[in-house]
Amino acid sequence: MVIAKELTKEFSGGKLAVSNVSFTARPGEIFGLLGVNGAGKTTTLRMLSTVLTPTAGSATVQGFDVVKEPTKVRESIGFLSTSTALYGRLSGKEVLQYFGRLYGLSNEKIKERTEVVESLLKLGEFWNRNCDSYSTGQKQRVSIARTILHDPPVLFFDESTAGLDIVSAQTVMEFIESCRAARKTVIFSTHIMSEVERLCDHIAVIHDGKLVADGRTDDIRAGRRLEEAFLDLVGYQKELTHA
Amino acid sequence: MREVFLKELREMFRDKRVRSTAFLGPIILIFGLLFLLSSVIGNLAKPQSVKVHLLENTPAAWVKRFEAEKYQVQFVKSEAEGRKLITDGKARTLVVFDGPTEAKVQKVRVLFDESEQLGQIGKERILGVFRVLNEKKLAGYLKGQNVTPEMVSEIAPEAVNIGVTKDKGAGEFLDGFLPYLIVIWAFYGGMSSASDLVAGEKERSTLETLLISPVSRTHIVLGKIFALSVICFLSSLSSLVGLGIFVGVRPPGSEMMLNKGLGINGSTVVLAIALLIPLVLMMASLLILISSYAKNAREAQTYLSLGSFVVIMPAMFSQFIGLTEFGKAAWVDYVPVLNVANHLRLALLSKPDFAGAGVAIVVNLILALLAGWIAVRMFHKETIITRA
């Protein structure tokens, strides 16, 4: 479970990136974090994953405080972002072994888990080659494997399908769906409404760093298309008219 | 930390740029540079390589004498033609025999261009030939008069070498050049990897993945610093491999550079390693510090290029320190880079200064710790580590 309470982040220079954001993401639920580019989604996820320290407010991940127990928090999460973040001169298998060791897994556990993720994501055909030689889809599959290697109960997906072709994006989407069945807590940050409609049980909309809506997806839609509901929430007004 | 260290080393060893710039580069460059220098020195030292121009009407005896001294004799029709060749840079010297003076001494003019180094060298060599002839004639005359050289001398000077003998210590050229190479490659060897190690990771977003892992940021930085130190150390030693190949090949002219050997023995090696370890730790910490500050690999390269001057300047001075009074000055031990280069130089001269080297080691260790500490602090600053 992830609980954010009045989470705030002000960067040096006075820029308020996130202001008083509160929400709860539960196990077995896919929680959508929606917002336009620059709304504060990534900053929120960075605070939850202990990369950034909140200026005010608090948050817990699996009951661990993000400021006071950052190592425990990191052990509990997997993070997949837009970038595949792989090491080009290592093979996919080596990347997984490396991260397995960083997460403190024993050699036996690494072997066991790499076999699990290899079979789940069908990595065997290419994972001995260097990551530099992978297609985008192959990179994404290895990235997912890296994210779940230590079997974290909480997963963050930050714009994970951005820039991917339709097949690679489908792999990510299917994987996120499978997390629900595995009773993981998933926070899925995106600005693509169709993905949210397909995946999310619960959504929070962030705009200009502030939470403008938080509720069940169907309740937020209120019978409309999600895109229309979202535009209303962020105060979009049609500006361009045909001459 | 161990995992980060091993992973970084593995990646760096697989990187073609690192293999070529940190390991192969110094070997090829050092060998090539020494080979070139030895050829130049060798050519300058050989009499047969010195060209001399004579007028066509030069007495045959003088022509034979120059040929006997293995000069390349070439003829010109007139003095004007010879002068033109010299000013055009096509001839070094023109020797003009003007005939006997009133005192029946052969008058000779050696024409050369003072602005041309080769002309100056040629002039000195030719004057040397005539000087020897004069001395021989004087010695013969004195002998005929039953006068010994001591009878016409006021003093009998003698130079006595009480320092390093010819069988010990490096040649004069190498004792300045070798330490320079060693310290310079300790920095340059790590430069190509450093920009990739932190700034490159920021750019590719792999650093964020690492920061989200349970490994502490301090251990991440230290793992990277130690891995880069290994590369810097090996790169520094690669320059010695280049030198070793040069010594093994011993191309023509190398005997002038290696006249006393390399001056390397067991204690030199131990001292060199003891001096190098804090130096590479300091260099690696500094490189990681700069790379951590940069937003991306390109920006890091710019900062690193500027930072390289901090290393180059004292390293260059170390080449000439033997020509100054500072070689034994205490303050040199407190100047990073220069202190290592100077103590390596003294060790190569078979004059190791262990106390001074100890000071240099402590100073560089303190600076390594300081740079490492700043790098660790920087890694904990989210404004720096998350900017890309």
Image: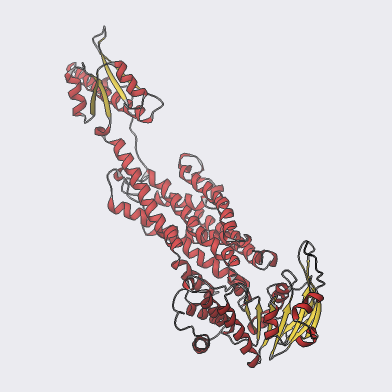
Q: Furthest-top residue in view?
A: B102
Q: Judge by depth and name the residue closer to the eye, A78 or B247.
A: A78
Q: Where is residue B273, by image quadrant? A: bottom left
Q: Which of A74 and A198 is in front in this view?
A: A198
Query: Percent from the top left, x then y, of residue A73?
Result: 68, 82
Name the residue rendered at 69%, 67% in the picture.
B382
Looking at the image, residue B279 lies above or below residue B319: below
Residue B353 in sight from this viewpoint: no
The colour scheme applied to this rendered structure is secondary structure
B193 and B161: which one is in front? B193
How far across and how far down the image is residue A138, in percent?
A: 51, 78
Height in image: B317 above or below A216? above
List x then y, in percent, for residue B91: 31, 26
Check the image and report above or below for A132 versus B72.
Answer: below
Could you tell me which quadrant the N terminus of chain B lies in?
bottom right
In this rendering, position of residue B384 left or right of residue A7: left
Visible residue check, residue B161: yes
What is the quadrant of residue B110 in the picture? top left
Q: Quadrant of the image for the C terminus of chain B?
A: bottom right
Residue B241 vs residue B340: left or right?
Answer: left
Seen in the picture, residue A165 relative to B181 is either above or below; the reply is: below
